Amino acid sequence: MRDEYDFSRMKSRKNPYAKKLKKQITIRLAVETIDYFKGLAEESGLPYQTLIDLYLDDCARNNKKMEVKWN
């Protein structure tokens, strides 16, 4: 392995995974919801935000619809 590398001659290229990157947003969630996912995070060893993302992704992929009933 070299002590130094010359990157000045490298050709740049677009990130092939750019479309799969995540977008940062602000979302308001109930404290109970966050606590639930934080509990799951402790059990699974995954960050709670990743678990929320995985759950929402599963809902979107499977076209899950929730039924909302107002009292």
Image: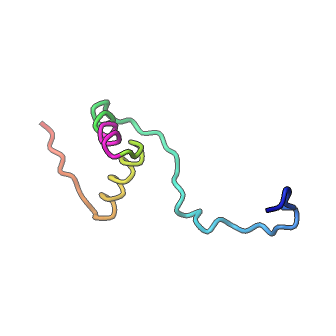
Q: Is residue 27 magenta?
A: no
What predominant SS class does the magenta segment belong to? helix
* Left or right of residue 41: residue 68: left
Depicted 60 relative to depicted 27: above or below: below
Q: Which residues are magenta?
A: 37-44
Q: Residue 10: x, y in percent?
A: 82, 67
Front-most of residues 70 and 3: 3
Q: Residue 38: x, y in percent?
A: 34, 37
What's the image's color scheme?
Answer: rainbow
Front-most of residues 45 and 49: 45
Q: Residue 47: x, y in percent?
A: 42, 43
Q: How many marks?
A: 0
Which quadrant of the figure contains the C terminus?
top left
Front-most of residues 71 and 26: 26
Which quadrant of the figure contains the N terminus?
bottom right
Residue closest to the far left: 71
Residue closest to the far front: 1
Task: Tell me the residue at 36%/48% (across/down).
Answer: 51
Q: Residue 44: x, y in percent?
A: 33, 46
Front-most of residues 67 and 59: 59
Task: Tell me the residue at 38%/42% (across/down).
Answer: 48
Task: Tell me the residue at 33%/35% (across/down).
Answer: 34
Task: Tell me the residue at 39%/50% (across/down).
Answer: 53
Depicted 36 relative to depicted 23: above or below: above
Depicted 32 relative to depicted 11: above or below: above
* Left or right of residue 66: residue 53: right
* Left or right of residue 39: residue 8: right
